Amino acid sequence: MKTVGGFTSENARTRFLTDYGRALDRRWPGRSTVDVPTEFGTTRVYTCGPDDGVPAVLLPGAGGNALMWHRYVSELGRHRRVIAVDPVGDPGGSTQDRPIDGAEHMSQWLGEVLTGLDVRRAHFIGCSYGGWTALQYAIRNPTAAASLTLLDPAGFGKVSGRFIAWVVLGGLAGLSPRPVRHRAAGWLRNATLRDDDVMGLATAMMGFRRRLPVPPPLTDEELRQLTTPTLVLLGERSQLYDAAAVARRIRTLTSAEVALVPGVGHDLPMNCPDRILDRTGAFLDQLR
């Protein structure tokens, strides 16, 4: 019987949400909070910016939540509504009630969130797992996706042992004292370890069990179905896959704009937010 993601106890949930709320208050004051019911559970989203125009929907990587975007929301919200999502099945303010089995369910869940927010069309910005989710949704709902910005997206190959080791070592480093954690950020090429607000949740996140599907490799046919204007930014030294090979494949099968960000790995959203914002802003400006 398939299970759902969630906290191991009510105490674990309370501890995490208390720390999470404090971090959001420090890094994203003035946000609005909305809980959206879906077939898979209640999804919490945070919003800011003007209500007119096409909004930007932010989807975090696996095990992440809206806090990872705290360096992005202010700038992105200057000209459009920003909607940062706590995905069901990941540690955040959402609650998963039904198992999610593959891309079809992920796309259905995201569509129900947008319907609940009365959003008919959006720009999607997704990191890693969130990039895979956004891509799968756009393939199935091309008229609902104004654009995709995919940051080292998952789904372009099998998860390698190198990536799993990187994740495990990063998790261990995240539980270390701050000076050790900051030094490990350089050794592991993982800038997230230097974000004290995000990493301040590391211990509390130990009380969460994630139960979401591993993205299968995207087929050539799936990529050929992509008609949405798309920007793909890959860490040149990505631990997830051979970024140069992934870039060649995307360019061959789609009309997406693809760039390798020099000197960074899978941590590029946390490593160089200014570069990502500049590139994303210029891309979105072209679509006005």
Image (tube, rainbow, N blue to C red):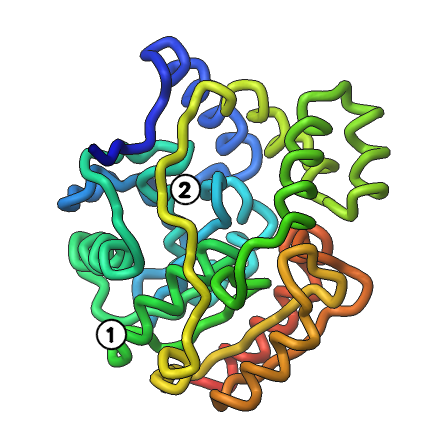
At 41% from the left and 75% from the top, the residue drawn is 219
Q: Give the mark nearer the N terminus: 2 vs 1.
A: 2
Residue picked out by circle 2: 31
Q: Secondary structure at mark 2?
A: loop
Q: x, y percentage for residue 276?
A: 64, 65
Can residue 146 be seen in the rendering of this structure?
A: yes
In the image, what residue type sits under mark 2? Arg
Q: Secondary structure at mark 1?
A: loop
At 79% from the left and 43% from the top, the residue drawn is 188
81 left or right, relative to 35: right
Real-space CA distance between mark 2 and mark 1, rounded to the nearest whole angstrom: 28 Å
Can residue 46 be seen in the rendering of this structure?
A: no
At 40% from the left and 63% from the top, the residue drawn is 56
In the image, what residue type sits under mark 1? Asn
Q: Is residue 82 above or below residue 212?
A: below
106 left or right, relative to 260: left
Q: x, y percentage for residue 258?
A: 61, 80
Q: Is residue 218 above or below residue 109?
A: below
Where does the N terminus fall, quadrant-wise? top left
Disc 2 crowd, CA 10 A, few/some/many (<14, 14-19, 20+)? some
Q: Indicate which disc residue 141 carries.
A: 1
**Nearer mark to the viewer, of 2 and 1:** 1
